[in-house]
Amino acid sequence: MPGRRLPPLSALRAFEAAARLRSFKRAAQELSVTPTAVSHQIRALEEHIGVRLFERQTRRVALTAAAERLFPVLRDGFDAFAATVEALRAPAQRRALTLSAPLSFTAKWLVPRMASFRQACPDLDLRLHASDDPVDLHAGVADAAIRYGRGPYPGLKAEPLIENRFAPVCSPRLALRQPGDLFAHALLHSEWRHPTADTPTWRLWRERAGLAELAGLDIDAGLRFTDESHAIQAAIAGHGVALLGLALVADDLASGALVQPFGPILDGYPHWFVQAPGPERAELSALRDWLRAQAADAGGPG
């Protein structure tokens, strides 16, 4: 196949822009050159093909019949070039973060709010690392974490996210009205990995209740769960009464799947937002701001 005999690309670009805009000056602005340079390129193109392309008029230019034939071919060709090049460009790298959080907090607090997160941060991909074992944020296992505890956390930036309170909750089908009704139902226990004297357990709850009628309540009997979210599901299913964090069951209480029949309410430790010290990436700030807003809506310190 013989080689193509084409004018210089710069001359073709100058003609296409001037023909589309009907102005040498505006074409020059688009191409970031001077109007004189555009005029020279078009004159060179006219000499190359041997025909006149523009009628110079006051404050504007008009296309000749030859230019009317050439312009749509070049316009469509440049549009096709631009579309193909854009399609071949490597897609922009999406921003991503890993947030580590306890199993129950991930299941009951984070996952139900993911639609809100996608709406607030549409260009940010969030990976949820659900684990009750604290991750090493200095090693980059996660970008940030949610931790339940007394705090503070030495060597980390930490701020309280949600204040936690614990109370008896159950399915409304159990029809509990007063603490004495607990004798007729199983107690559901969440096993704490590192309990302390003020860990919200049924034993502490009975002590704080201070009711003589509960003295004979066997607070060691019942069903035990290593994951609080499973205790929540058991309570919803009507398998007994659980002593649960009210922040994690707020949606279930609002929907009527669970009720809080009586107190007392025990104070727990906060859930904290923690991260490694140092300069903060914009995406981490966006995640923290979203968590703050969600905590404020849920009644946390936000």
Image (cartoon, rainbow, N blue to C red):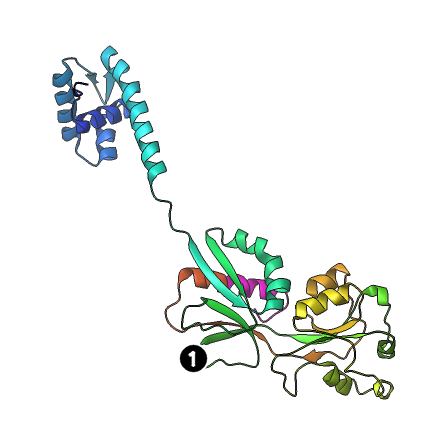
Work out whether 20 lies above or below 253: above
Q: Quadrant of the N terminus?
A: top left
Q: Is residue 8 magenta?
A: no
The magenta segment: 289-302
296 inside magenta stretch:
yes
* Residue 192 x, y percent position in the rendering: 64, 79
Image quadrant in which you'd find residue 62? top left
Front residue of 293/2: it is 2
Seen from the viewer's position, the closer of residues 242 and 35 is: 242
- Residue 261, located in which quarter of the rendered image? bottom right
Q: On the rendered structure, is 277 left or right of 130?
A: left
Q: Quadrant of the C terminus?
A: bottom right
Q: Is residue 125 left or right of residue 297?
A: left
Pick the residue in front: 117 or 192. 192
Amino acid type for the residue under numbered disc 1: Gly
Position in image of residue 172 (x %, y %): 82, 65
The residue labelled by disc 1 is 155
Image spot of residue 229 (x, y percent): 67, 67
Residue name at image x 85 percent, y 67 percent = 174
Residue in view at x 76 percent, y 64 percent? 236
User: x, y percentage for residue 31?
Assistant: 23, 34
- The answer to which image quadrant residue 85 occupies is top left
SS at circle 1: loop
| Residue plotted at (13% across, 18% down) | 48
Residue drawn at (76%, 67%), measured in percent from left and top?
Answer: 235
Q: Is residue 179 above or below residue 49?
A: below
